[in-house]
Image (cartoon, rainbow, N blue to C red):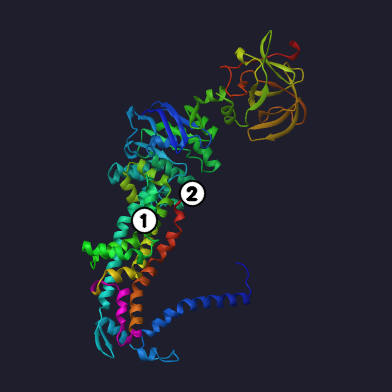
Amino acid sequence: MEHTSLLERILRGAALALVVIFFMFPIAWIFMMSFQTNETILRIPPQLVFEPTLANYTALITGKLMTAAGTLDIAFMRNLGNSVFLSVTSVAVSLLLGVPAAYAFARHKFRGSEDIAFTLLSFKFAPALLVLLPLTLYFQKLGLANTYIGLIWVYQLICLPLILWIVRGYFEDIPADIEYAYRIGGHSWFATFRKIALPLAGPGIAAAGLLAFIFAWNNFVFALVLASADKQPVTVGALAFITSSGIQYGQISAAIVLSITPTLALALYAQRYLVEGLSLGAVKG
Amino acid sequence: MASLELRNVVKRYKSQTVLDNLSLTVADGETLVLFGPSGAGKTVLLRLVAGVIDPDEGKILIGGDDMTDVDAEFRGVGMAFQNFALFPHMSAFDNIATPLEATRSSQSAIKAGVESVAKLLKIAHVLSHKPRALSNGQKQRTALARALVGSPPLLLLDDPLRNVDAKLRFEMRLELPRLLADRGATVVYVTQDYKEAMALGDRIAVMSQGVIRQLGTPEQIYREPANIEIARLFGDPAINLLDVKPARDARGVYVGLSNVQVHLAEVPETAIGRDCIIGLRPEALHFVGENEPGAIPVTVEAETPLNEKIVTLVRTVRGREILVSRPAGTPGRNEGKAHISVDGKSALLFDHASGERIGSKNVIKLRNGEAA
């Protein structure tokens, strides 16, 4: 351990604290707002001391939003359910399609394989708004607009390239000799994929899946255009809090807290896989 | 039991030809060593036989059956890799058991099979360890055990001793021939270590640039190398190579070494007057008294005692440096002026331009300079 002076340690601590405050302040402030009424939130100057209320959470969970203009039905819990359903299903479909495809791209250099892989990646280049209009027209013609299947399909634009490219890298990192050794031992290529490649790329697949889940969860614009109220995820559902009688900051904050909880929990749970995934190089030797 | 035959095999990567129209036959139960520098195509050849890569042209026959288009898992070969290629997520036991699992053996048969081969290779005590907890030597033995466990009739060993330390390599070099002979399997063994090649091979195939340059017993490769390159690769210290121009007198063809005429036998007429290189094995040179016939005057430059032999660097009158090797404990000179003589049997003559050896056997007959 190299010697560090007291001053250096203090300065380092201060710098770290500054960074943490900078990034955590909005989240902490939102967390505090979720326990306040609109009146206390909008007080000027803002105050750190307030009387906490669970009214925002109650309103979200019961689905009854009390505003100055009267009671308003909101479908927040349904939105949350939609988010979970859409994200989980999309990632599952992406993994099902993307992992074997990634393996193929990593191990079998067939004619045009690079082009196909790049085309899939290029889906991430185009701004979502650019593809939305033609997509909406097609979907309406095909009867896919405002269906879960349609949404999950569109979500593949987000999840599939991500999973494909990340997982492909992990497959490529597995020394080919390890797979050869298994095949020479008398196992089919599919058994090799299942028993050797999949377990060794496991941490990478988990990391890619988590990342894809977060992207899918946070998606806004596809669902805004392609889904109506009963199929919208939380990101779009939050718009309901901008009511004719004003913006419901308290409920928005509570909704944010509730909607980041699943991703946060998942990220915390999967943290060790993420770290392991990043150090997959240890496979060699 | 299985013989191996390669017929006109060609393998290209992009524009580069890695194996160039290569044919090779390995008899049933024979151990063939593929020897050559890295990039010679040895590993590619082994992988073609294993079936993990496909040849562009040619046929591969195992036990007389055409296996060219047969997938790796149906070829019934065992292979050990240079980098071990152990499955990092499985214990040593599970690693070794994989070939048995493929044959759908019963659990008890698998256990018995793994344990017997582990005992043979002295790794029975580490079977529960994951590869990362094994030493390099244990990894190497695990990889070897995995190749052996299914008793494959054809064993492919890709430089299995490359990544282990010198002591273990020496140990395994002694152990392996017996182990392989007991199995009765046909073995193709790849190595870059000429001592390993000499110790293990019934025959050695010397490869470079995708072509087999010479195929023969270890004795043949050492005594009658096909070209300068092979002569240089086999032997430590390396063979002495000197430029000479063979000439002819009444007694036959001779070359001049420091004004001493050394007569060669069985040199074709075409060699006379051509630029040639003579190869003299260090152990075929001896320190002799000044008055011995054929004594060549030299100056001793340096002496390096190795364990079982002493290597002396000497300089001839013409300033050419020559290595002389002698068993430890035998008399020699370690400084000043000395004389050396050439042992009759092992001098080799190569064509300067092509590097090919001239004549089938160059038995040297020494003639004293004054006789000419």
Left or right of B320, for residue A47: left
Indicate which disc residue A120 carries.
1
- For residue A230, above or below residue B51: below
* Foreground tag (1 vs 2): 1
Question: Which residue lies most toward the top here?
Answer: B250
Question: Which residue lies most toward the left here?
Answer: A143
- For residue B27, above or below residue B265: below
Left or right of B62, for residue B37: right
Q: Secondary structure at mark 2?
A: loop
Question: In terms of image quadrants, where is residue B312?
Answer: top right
Q: Residues within 10 Å of mark 1 (few under 14, many from 20)?
A: some
Position of the C terminus of chain B by quadrant: top right
Question: In terms of image quadrants, where is residue B9?
Answer: top left
The residue under the point 53% across, 25% down is B221
Find disc 2 in the rendering and name its residue: B135
For the question of whether residue A107 can be seen, the reply is: yes
Which amino acid type corresponds to the residue marked 1 in the rendered image?
Leu
Q: Is residue A248 magenta?
A: yes
Indicate which disc residue A62 carries.
none
Q: Nearer the viewer, residue A89 or B287?
A: A89
- The residues tagged by marks 1 and 2 sit, at their Cα atoms, a distance apart of 43 Å
- For residue B267, above or below residue B175: above
Q: Nearer the viewer, residue A31 or B61?
A: A31
Position of the N terminus of chain B by quadrant: top left
Q: Residues within 10 Å of mark 2 (few under 14, many from 20)?
A: few
The residue under the point 34% across, 81% down is A252
